[in-house]
Image: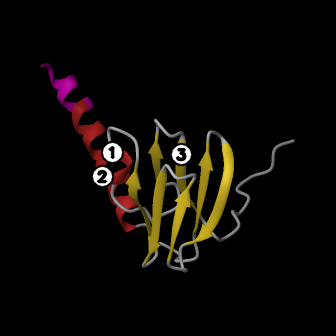
Amino acid sequence: MKKNDWILAGVIVVIAAVVLLFQLTRKNSGEGEVSVSVDGEKFGIYSLTEDRTVDINGTNRLIIENGTARMEWADCPDQICVEHNAISREGESIICLPNKVVVAVESGEEAELDGVVR
């Protein structure tokens, strides 16, 4: 590899480290909600502050506890959604492709405008 290749690789590693650091240190407002949709249709929205078990059409079971959401059970063969870590931050999601279930954390706070387009 040439000198410029090493510089490019170093810049990419630094950018990746900054993005990772931002994601890990971003604070959780604790006011978030979990949005559940099945086959593109909204199934329900649940608060992360209230512990509960959600049965999703008999194919998946979602557990919300201690400000996090995790998939406890699914009838799909690969079980990737069940093995996924619990989610609690805005933008995180758990997806079960065979059952077309998407669980995503949404912020409880309204987003601020960052610009105006005319």
| Amino acid type for the residue under numbered disc 3 | Val
Q: CA distance from mark 2 to mark 3?
A: 15 Å
| Image quadrant in which the C terminus is located | top right
Q: Which mark is residue 17?
A: none
Q: Mark 3 or mark 1: name the one nearer the start of the chain.
A: 1
| Crowd rating for badge 2 (residues with CA inside 10 Å; few <14, some 14–19, many 20+) | few
| Count of numbered circles on the image | 3
Contact (CB < 8 A) between labels 2 and 3?
A: no
Q: Position of residue 42 (x, y in %)?
A: 69, 51
Residue 79: which numbered mark, if any?
1
Residue drawn at the location 48% of the way across and 72% of the way down: 28
Report the mark closest to the observer, 1 or 2. 1
Within-10-Å neighbours for mark 3: few <14, some 14–19, many 20+: many
Task: Give the residue type that dot 2 points to.
Answer: Glu
Magenta stretch contains residue 109: no
Circle 3 residue: 101
Q: Which residues are magenta?
A: 1-8
In the displayed structure image, the side of residue 65 where residue 17 appears, left or right: left
Secondary structure category for the residue under label 3: strand
Residue type highlighted by circle 1: Gln
SS of the residue under disc 1 = loop
Residue 1 visible in rendering? yes
Q: Is residue 107 above or below residue 95?
A: below
Q: Position of residue 18 (x, y in %)?
A: 34, 53
Tell me the residue that label 2 is attached to: 83
Q: Are marks 1 and 2 in contact (CB under 8 Å)?
A: yes
Specify the quadrant that holds the N terminus.
top left
